[in-house]
Amino acid sequence: MKAGFIGTGSIGAPLATNILDQEKSLAVFDINPEATKSLAEKQARILPSPKAVADEAEVVFACMPTMESFHAVVTGTNGVLGGEAMKTFVNLGTMGTEAVAEVEADLAAKGIAMLDSPITGGVQRAWAGDITVVSSGPQAIFDQVEPLLQSFARDIHYVGPEIGQAQLVKIANNIMSFTNLVIACEALVMVAKGGVDLEKALGVMNSGSGQNSATLSKVPNFVLNRAFNMEAPMHIIEKDAVLWRMEAERLETPQNVAAATYQTMRQALAMGLKGGDLSEIVRVVERAANFELPKTRD
């Protein structure tokens, strides 16, 4: 199957590169020409529009940052719906159940199949081909696309036959991840303000029952060095948090702890951190505590 890729930003570029390395051919589009330069150097075909990609590729991947750009890539002027070759459209972004259902209907009207495959793991793991993919959609379509997913994913989880099921799992994973980070920041600010050596406290947590993804990697690698360069833009995280709220309301499920995480995010935005990195959410806790974590790592 000829493959195409739309959206080669910070997370899309490594995914597209891994597909290109495996398949030795890839049709590519990004609204920002600078984002396609490294792929052009590896002989990818850089095309002028999503439609042009769908005119060449049978399977088209899209890794879009917003719901607006997601819809535009499909149904906008020169969107993939106008392409002549595309048989399957694969969404890699976190867009929520409503948006993917709308796009699935648009594609189905043209006889095009869809696979919903949001990714999780971050930029560094994407370059290493170590990303995790959550997929849902028709089993036969998943089976066809899986070899391409394997080019950039270590773990691929097929969670069901319906478009949107993967979105729900990804959104649940996201709010858990965000909550891990918030509670880790709160706990570490508390013990450090109480005079405990920060590194020693973190060592206890990582060998004890408090261990989580934030204490193991996010806090040590991006907070304790005060680098705040996790490559998780707060404006994208805001979108993911809003999607969590929409799904919680739609399904009428209690989400009290997640709601507290959401409010902390809202505080971060109110502090002017929308253009910052998710790891900077520690600043919300620090401001409220009138205490700043010491820099313990380079």
Image (spheres, rainbow, N blue to C red):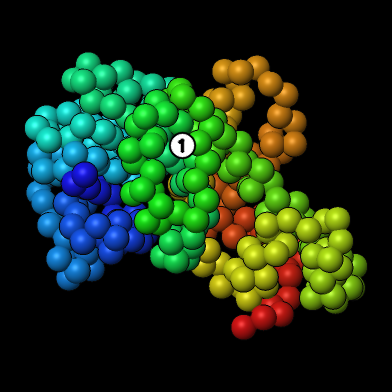
Q: Secondary structure at mark 1?
A: strand
Q: Does 113 sit above or below residue 297?
A: above
Image location of residue 124, percent across then percent down: 47, 65
Q: Quadrant of the N terminus?
A: top left
Pick the front one: 182 or 108 = 108
| Residue kind at label 1, given as amino acid type | Ser
Q: Residue at x 73, y 76 (%)?
A: 294
Name the image quarter holding residue 83: top left
In the displayed structure, does residue 240 sit left or right of residue 285?
left
Task: Decide if residue 57 is in sight here.
Answer: yes
Pick the front one: 290 or 218 = 218
Q: Does 278 sit above or below residue 250?
A: below
Label 1: how many residues lie within 10 Å, few (<14), some (14-19) or many (20+)? many
Image location of residue 243, percent across then percent down: 51, 32
Circle 1 residue: 135
In the displayed structure, does residue 289 sit left or right of residue 280?
right
Q: Residue at x 68, y 58 (%)?
A: 214
Image location of residue 115, percent across then percent down: 36, 33
